[in-house]
């Protein structure tokens, strides 16, 4: 990981889903874990993989790739779980998100961030806070509040969605 | 942080709430035993404290209002006024009013102000100088009304506790106050004073027997000691007064004095007293009071004697309790939960290593952590009696409103439940009681016509049974009308006509949402909103509810609840690579099922002649892989019916610390939470009633 700068604004944690680079504002990121056993909770939408034991708490883990419709995350040695804390409905909630790999903490100030283009982005615009440019790389900065709220609203409220037979995590 | 002012207000509010609920209970008791002067004193003290503390903490409206109520009770305790039902009614409503006053954060609305004024008007009728109603039979007759001119002699025993000086109270000041009321004769007792070498200068080791000749009433004497009641033993006896009821007490006291002085032997005294007819006998002979009332009064007298005697013990009880903020307790329970988990992990790791020293240490650790778990969880346990007591008022008011005569009998008040469970149980129980009162118990004339006693009885009982608490609400009323239920169910399409349903199943239909067979909706019940809300509240507490009812005889509703919310005993099971936990309290037994190629969610198994439906978790949760040839089936009992759950393997008992799954899984019904296994992985806790429901839906 790159050395963290002294203040937290303008700092973003970058990670990959497939080959695409994404970033999250570091203020919402609590920690990054290696992939651990995810306990499946049956009868929930398939982009919620299940729960993990985080120091005694049950924390749900989301597969962003499934949520964004980019396929699904297959575990590799680089797969990580990014633990975020976001306000859902006014309540601070802790969630995990699967990432194919986690890169580094970049500092990007406002001048390096552009608003998302109208089309052509791999995911819905409402999830994107902006496009960060570092060197030649284009990083999609996610709006954590929107991404995870949609997780909540996506039919989880009724738990009726049938989960198909799944492979359980190793 | 709370300012000191806020903290004081909070402290006052808490104290006032407690005082008000004690006050209400005393008033209700007084209604049953109007002659109990101890109760009157208790009520007066409570009012006095509410008034005084209220004034101190800025609750001036409370103080002003309470003052007038206190005045009336002052007259009652001095014998100028007798307790009657109007006063009690006003007093109970006054309790409500005071409660409104202290709880309202904003300016009072005009309704409340008007209600207060009306109550005060009512009280004013009793606080005048007229001698109001005729006194109750056992109260002092006319001579006492002239008490202003009449000297009375009291014997006062003041025995301060040794540490009274540490509380800032000086007995000498008390005696000085007493002396102002009249002529005081003191006799000091120095038996407890130690030798000069051993004496503790800060302890009060002397006590006094006083005789006071005064025109004042008992009330004024008690007032002198109002603030030191807990710091001393105090006995105040009226020695000389013309009234008949006290004469027995007077004689005893005179006798005591004579025996003490050696003028009379104890045997002679006892013989003399025995030859005297008892007051109760005099009264019944003269037909003034009937025997049952005398018996009831005697019971109260014995009770208050017993209560008065271990005054020291009572003091000790009060001193040994302590208020704790609820969230501190929650944190403690959390930490104990963590400890239990780590201990389970240690146990597992130690088993794997097989080191004998480690193993014995791990066993010791397990015993200690089990004991710690039990102690901590028991801290949160409170007796349900307080909740039952609140209901007395409800039953009384509601019965009066509906014109029914109902007695509320309670049993098992000392049964303890987790604090949260008690809180969440309040509303459902209220609803069940309302139903009993509204729909269950019939009007007095109907009851007489049916050959039942005029007064209906509602019994509220609580008891421990296995790992559960069972609370029953039963009435001897009309019972559930199974025909009406059936008709309603058919008209709503819930039941096809012609289908056989047992009475039990029919009765259970009332728990469905929107179900009510009453033709009229009162503002009490009948809207069909209540019973399913009750059931959901009880389900949320991981409990179950059953109804037993017989037309014409009455109904009994039994609520079963687990003893604790945080840590339960569970049975760990495995399906595929996933682990789940079944609450052990629901498990009846485990059997085995051989896999005979029968697919589908529901199967039926034959258990000793009983057909038990069976679910396969593998199918319900769509878990991959092959089921083993022989599947263990965990048989659980849910809502009175048996259900089998087929799994791959029964792992064993597991102390389950319940972890919430969080808001994301709020609406997932089949799981009531998760727990952490010995190896750190999570296991989901099955919500058996929800599973059963789901399976039933799918099966239909």
Image (tube, coloured by chain):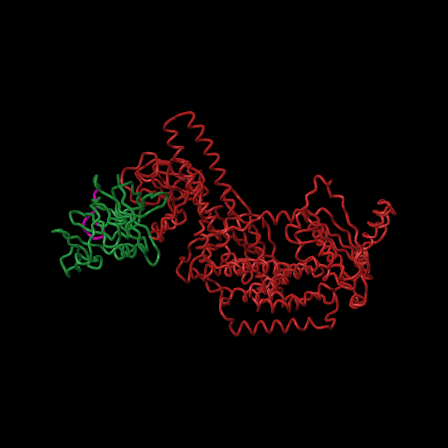
Chain colours: A green, B red
Q: Quadrant of the N terminus of chain A?
A: top left
Front residue (pair B672, B11): B11
Which residue of the protein is positioned furthest toward the top in this rendering? Answer: B356
Relative to B240, B661 lies left or right: left
Q: Is residue A68 magenta?
A: yes
Tag count: 0
The image quadrant of residue A142 is bottom left
Which residue of the protein is positioned furthest toward the front in this rendering? Answer: B197
Relative to B306, B646 lies left or right: left
Q: Answer yes or no: is residue B611 visible.
A: no
Dominant SS of magenta comes to: loop
Q: Position of residue A89 (x, y in %)?
A: 33, 58
Q: Position of residue B537 (x, y in %)?
A: 45, 55
- Who's the residue at 60% across and 73% down the image? B118
Q: Is residue A51 magenta?
A: no
Q: Quadrant of the C terminus of chain A?
A: top left
Q: Is residue B185 above or below residue B337?
A: below
Which residue of the protein is positioned furthest toward the right in this rendering? Answer: B263
Q: Position of residue A138 (x, y in %)?
A: 14, 53
Front residue (pair A34, B115): A34
Relative to B234, B119 lies left or right: left
The image quadrant of residue A158 is bottom left
Q: Which residues are magenta?
A: A65-74
Q: Answer yes or no: is residue B198 visible.
A: yes
Q: Position of residue B275 (x, y in %)?
A: 86, 50
């Amino acid at each position: 990981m790159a050395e963290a700068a002294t203040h937290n604004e303008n700092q973003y944690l970058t990670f990959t889903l497939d080959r695409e680079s994404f970033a999250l504002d570091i203020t919402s990121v609590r920690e990054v874990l290696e992939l651990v056993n995810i306990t499946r909770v049956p009868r929930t939408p398939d982009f919620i993989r299940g729960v993990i034991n985080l120091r005694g708490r049950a924390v749900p883990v989301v597969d962003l790739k499934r949520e964004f419709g980019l396929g699904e995350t297959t575990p590799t040695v680089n797969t990580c779980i990014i633990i975020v804390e976001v306000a859902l409905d006014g309540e601070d909630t802790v969630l995990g998100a699967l990432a194919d790999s986690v890169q580094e903490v970049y500092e990007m100030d406002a001048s390096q961030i552009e608003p998302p283009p109208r089309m052509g982005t791999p995911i819905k615009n409402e999830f994107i806070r902006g496009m960060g440019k570092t060197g030649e790389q284009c990083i999609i900065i996610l709006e954590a509040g929107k991404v995870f709220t949609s997780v909540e609203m996506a039919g989880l409220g009724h738990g009726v969605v049938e989960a198909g037979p799944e492979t359980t995590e190793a | 942080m709370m300012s000191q002012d806020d903290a004081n207000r909070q402290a006052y509010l808490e104290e006032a709430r407690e005082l008000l609920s004690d006050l209400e209970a005393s008033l209700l008791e007084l209604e049953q035993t109007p002659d109990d002067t101890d109760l009157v004193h208790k009520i007066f003290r409570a009012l006095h404290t509410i008034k005084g503390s209220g004034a101190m903490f800025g609750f001036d409206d409370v103080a002003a209002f309470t003052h007038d109520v206190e005045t009336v009770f002052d007259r009652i305790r001095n014998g100028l006024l007798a307790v009657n039902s109007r006063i009690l009614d006003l007093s109970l409503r006054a309790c409500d009013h005071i409660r409104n006053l202290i709880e309202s954060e904003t300016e009072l609305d005009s309704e409340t102000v008007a209600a207060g004024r009306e109550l005060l008007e009512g009280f004013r009728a009793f606080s005048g100088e007229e001698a109001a109603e005729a006194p109750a039979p056992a109260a002092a007759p006319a001579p006492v009304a002239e008490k202003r001119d009449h000297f009375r002699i009291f014997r006062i025993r003041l025995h301060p506790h040794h540490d009274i000086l540490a509380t800032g109270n000086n007995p000498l000041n008390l005696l000085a106050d007493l002396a102002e009321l009249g002529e005081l004769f003191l006799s000091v007792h120095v038996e407890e004073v130690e030798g000069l070498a051993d004496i503790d200068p800060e302890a009060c080791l002397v006590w006094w027997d006083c005789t006071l000749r005064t025109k004042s009433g008992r009330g004024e004497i008690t007032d002198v000691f109002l603030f030191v009641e807990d710091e001393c033993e105090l006995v105040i006896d009226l020695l000389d007064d013309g009234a008949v009821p006290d004469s027995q007490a007077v004689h005893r006291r005179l006798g005591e004095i004579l025996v003490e002085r050696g003028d009379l032997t104890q045997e002679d005294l006892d013989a003399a007293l025995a030859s005297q007819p008892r007051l109760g006998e005099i009264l019944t002979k003269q037909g003034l009071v009937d025997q049952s009332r005398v018996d009831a009064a005697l019971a109260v007298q014995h009770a208050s004697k017993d209560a008065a005697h271990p005054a020291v013990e009572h003091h000790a009880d009060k001193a040994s309790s302590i208020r704790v903020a609820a969230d501190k307790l929650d944190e403690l329970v959390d930490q104990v939960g963590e400890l239990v988990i780590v201990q389970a992990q240690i146990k597992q790791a130690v088993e794997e290593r097989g080191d004998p020293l480690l193993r014995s240490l791990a066993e010791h650790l397990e015993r200690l952590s089990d004991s710690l778990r039990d102690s901590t969880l028991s801290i949160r346990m409170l007796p349900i009696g307080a909740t039952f007591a609140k209901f007395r008022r409800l039953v009384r008011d509601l019965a009066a409103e509906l014109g029914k005569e109902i007695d509320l009998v309670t049993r098992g008040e000392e049964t303890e439940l987790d604090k949260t469970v008690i809180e969440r149980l309040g509303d459902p129980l209220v609803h069940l009681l309302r139903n009993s009162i509204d729909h269950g118990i019939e009007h007095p004339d109907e009851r007489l016509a049916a050959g039942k006693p005029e007064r209906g009885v509602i019994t509220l009982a609580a008891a421990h049974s296995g790992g559960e608490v069972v609370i029953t609400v039963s009435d001897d009323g009309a019972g559930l009308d199974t025909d009406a239920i059936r008709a309603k169910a058919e008209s709503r399409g819930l039941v096809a006509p012609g289908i056989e349903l047992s009475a039990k199943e029919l009765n259970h239909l009332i728990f469905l949402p929107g179900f009510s067979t009453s033709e009229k909706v009162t503002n009490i019940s009948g809207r069909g909103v209540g019973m399913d809300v009750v059931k959901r509240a009880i389900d949320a507490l991981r409990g179950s509810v059953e109804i037993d009812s017989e037309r014409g005889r009455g109904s009994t509703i039994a609520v079963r609840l687990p003893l604790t919310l945080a840590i339960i005993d569970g049975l760990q099971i495995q399906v595929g690579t996933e682990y789940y936990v079944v609450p052990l309290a629901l498990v009846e037994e485990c059997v085995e099922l051989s896999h005979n190629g029968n697919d589908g969610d529901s199967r039926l198994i034959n258990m000793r002649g009983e057909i038990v439906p069976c679910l396969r978790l593998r199918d319900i949760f769509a878990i991959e892989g092959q089921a083993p040839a022989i599947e263990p089936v965990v048989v659980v009992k849910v809502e009175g019916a048996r259900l089998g759950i087929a799994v791959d393997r029964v792992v064993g008992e597991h102390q389950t610390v319940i972890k919430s799954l969080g808001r994301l899984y709020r609406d997932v019904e089949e799981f009531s939470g998760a727990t952490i296994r010995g190896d750190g992985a999570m296991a989901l806790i099955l919500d058996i009633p929800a599973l059963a429901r789901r399976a039933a839906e799918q099966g239909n």
